[in-house]
Structures are given as structure tokens and as C-alpha cells.
Image (tube, grey):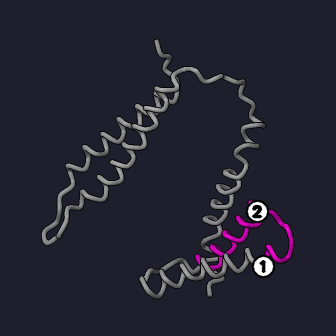
């Protein structure tokens, strides 16, 4: 008899959840003069979620309850997921300072700080590359959204 572990329960729950989401797409009504159904994109996303959940379930069933249980150590878990926590903290700081710095300056600071903390403070050349990448890519995205797409992005107190 197979042992039901947490992975099997989570995978089955995700499959049920994707089924509920797929059923909810039948309530969408397409407005007149639309060339395609508005159900298409949500169903594609839910279908991908269902496929990934099914793969997760098959892998969990194939593995069964054979994984070795180790004692949980908070310090080791935190050390293994340190970069994830750094990214979340930096993103929360980015959102908190968005009214002050705005999208452009805040985005550049967010990307540069992420690169610096996750990639290390090696030397001046690495930092110059980090600054260049942050300015070019965040500035480029800001320009596309502001000028090409005409999206009004938050300016903040110190906006450019």
C-alpha cells in the first residue's frame, strides 16, 4: 500500500483547484464585436496549471512514501532559502518607497540592490556593470511603458 504524503495531497489539491477555475470560465460572456472568446486566455493558463499539477501528481505517486524524513532545522531552511527572502524584502521595500522614488528611480535602485546583494560586491567593474544593466533595462522598460504604450507610471516625489 502506498503512503500518502504531502506532495500527493498538494498535487491533488492543485488539480481540483484548476478544475474549479476551468469551470468558472464558463461564466464568462463574450461582449459583442469580439473576434475571439475571452475564455481563451484564462483556459490556457488554467490548462498549463493542470498539466503541471498532473506531472507533479505522477511524480509524487511514482516516488510514493519512500523519501527519507529528516528533522527540520529552521537555521538550515533559512540558509537554503536566503536569496528568496532577500528578494521578497527588497521588493517590499521597493513597493514601500514607490510613492517617494517613483517607478524609474525605485526600479533602478531595486534592480541594482538585487544584483549587488545576490551577486556580491566583487569589484568596481562588477558594480559598474550592475549599474549599467539596471539603468539600461529599467530605463528601457520605463520608456516603453511611458512613451510607446502611454501608461502613466508612478512618478514619486523625486521623479525625473
Q: Which mark is residue 35?
A: none
Side (left or right) of 60 relative to 78 = left
Assign the C terminus to one quadrant of the image: bottom right
Side (left or right) of 72 relative to 127 = left
Q: Which mark is residue 119?
A: 2
Residue lying at 65% horizontally and 78% vertically, measured from the top left: 105
Pointer 2 or 1: first along the chain: 2
Q: Position of residue 79 (x, y in %)?
A: 76, 43
Choose between 54 and 19: the one closer to the eye: 54
| Vertical relation: 85 (above or below) 150 | above
The region drawn magenta spans: 103-128
Choose between 57 and 21: the one closer to the eye: 57
Q: What distance separates the C-alpha of mark 2 from that of mark 1?
A: 13 Å
| Vertical relation: 109 (above or below) 92 | below
User: What secondary structure is marked by label 2?
Assistant: helix
Residue position marked by numbered label 1 in the rendering: 128
Instruction: Report the magenta stretch's main SS.
Output: helix
Residue lying at 73% horizontally and 41% vertically, measured from the top left: 78
Residue sitting at the far left: 32
Amino acid at each position: 500500500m502506498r503512503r500518502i504524503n504531502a506532495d500527493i495531497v498538494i498535487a491533488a489539491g492543485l488539480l481540483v483547484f484548476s478544475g474549479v477555475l476551468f469551470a468558472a470560465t464558463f461564466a464568462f460572456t463574450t461582449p459583442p464585436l469580439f473576434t475571439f472568446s475571452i475564455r481563451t486566455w484564462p483556459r490556457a493558463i488554467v490548462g498549463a496549471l493542470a498539466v503541471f499539477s498532473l506531472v507533479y501528481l505522477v511524480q509524487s505517486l511514482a516516488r510514493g512514501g519512500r523519501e527519507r524524513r529528516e528533522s527540520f532545522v529552521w537555521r538550515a531552511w533559512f540558509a537554503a532559502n536566503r536569496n528568496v527572502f532577500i528578494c521578497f524584502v527588497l521588493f517590499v521595500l521597493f513597493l514601500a518607497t514607490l510613492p517617494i522614488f517613483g517607478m524609474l528611480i525605485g526600479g533602478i535602485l531595486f534592480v541594482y540592490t538585487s544584483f549587488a546583494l545576490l551577486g556580491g560586491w566583487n569589484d568596481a567593474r562588477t558594480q559598474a556593470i550592475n549599474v549599467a544593466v539596471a539603468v539600461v533595462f529599467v530605463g528601457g522598460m520605463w520608456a516603453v511603458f511611458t512613451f510607446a504604450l502611454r501608461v502613466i507610471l508612478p512618478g514619486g516625489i523625486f521623479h525625473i
